Amino acid sequence: MSDPTSVIDRYAEGGPLLQYATSGLPSEHEATRVGPGLWSLSELVAHLLDADLVIADRMKRVIAENDPVLQAFDENAWIERLDSQAMPVEEAVALFAANRRWMTRVLHNCTEADFARSGRHTEDGRKTLAELVAKAVSHLDHHLVFLYAKRAALGTAVLPRYTAR
């Protein structure tokens, strides 16, 4: 990995980006299902939180354990079975941002050798710490596109911001 600091900085920007993207969102719009995609804003933000916590767990395992198994999860089952429709967006965003701050501290303490460490994902094969951090960044950017479009469809648009460079 050429520059771990760059990807860590992009990862750290995720909390503020999601806070901005959901700022001023009327609570009555949180559960409204509007395209693009099938999920409501509350389900979308719950998915972002769930995925970020799962990826953080995978990163910790790769850093601390030898050749860990990185379990896949069924995002649609989690949305359906964990009542994500009822999750308050503001609480999910606060936890997402706190997780990103915590993991940023962990990542800043990692060496270049740590970023080369890997685990075995049950569906995607071997993944390094560097790849997991990059996945967290790209996953948020991917879903922010949907979040901004949903807000626009609801008439509560904000000017988009992304980490993509």
Image (spheres, helix red, strand yellow):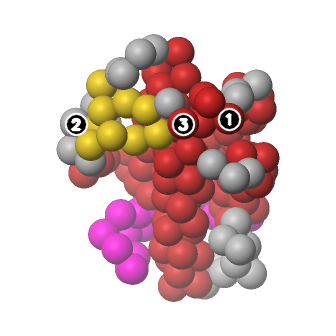
- SS label for mark 1: helix
Whether residue 86 appears in this view of the structure is no
Instruction: Give the Cα distance between marks 2 and 1.
Output: 25 Å
| Residue 115 part of the magenta-drawn span | no
In magenta, the rendered stretch is 23-41
* Badge nearest the viewer, 2 or 1: 1
Of the 4 image quadrants, the one containing the C terminus is: bottom right
Residue receiving disc 2: 122
Q: Nearer the viewer, residue 4 or 155?
A: 4
Q: Is residue 112 above or below residue 146?
A: above
Q: Residue at x 41, y 54 (%)?
A: 43
Q: Residue at x 35, y 21 (%)?
A: 68
Q: Nearer the viewer, residue 5 or 31?
A: 5
Q: Earlier in the sequence, mark 3 or mark 2?
A: 3
Q: Quadrant of residue 140?
A: bottom right
Q: Are marks 3 and 1 in contact (CB under 8 Å)?
A: yes
- Give the residue type that dot 1 points to: Glu
Residue receiving disc 1: 112
- SS label for mark 3: helix
Q: Position of residue 91 (x, y in %)?
A: 62, 39
- Give the residue type that dot 2 points to: Thr
Instruction: Give the Cα distance between marks 3 and 1.
Output: 7 Å
Q: Position of residue 13 (x, y in %)?
A: 75, 53
Q: Position of residue 3 (x, y in %)?
A: 74, 51
Q: Earlier in the sequence, mark 2 or mark 1?
A: 1
Residue receiving disc 3: 116
Q: Position of residue 70 (x, y in %)?
A: 33, 30
Q: Nearer the viewer, residue 72 or 49?
A: 72
Whether residue 87 sits left or right of residue 38 in the image: it is right
Q: Residue at x 54, y 75 (%)?
A: 145
Q: Is residue 102 above or below residue 25?
A: above
Q: Main secondary structure of the magenta part?
A: loop
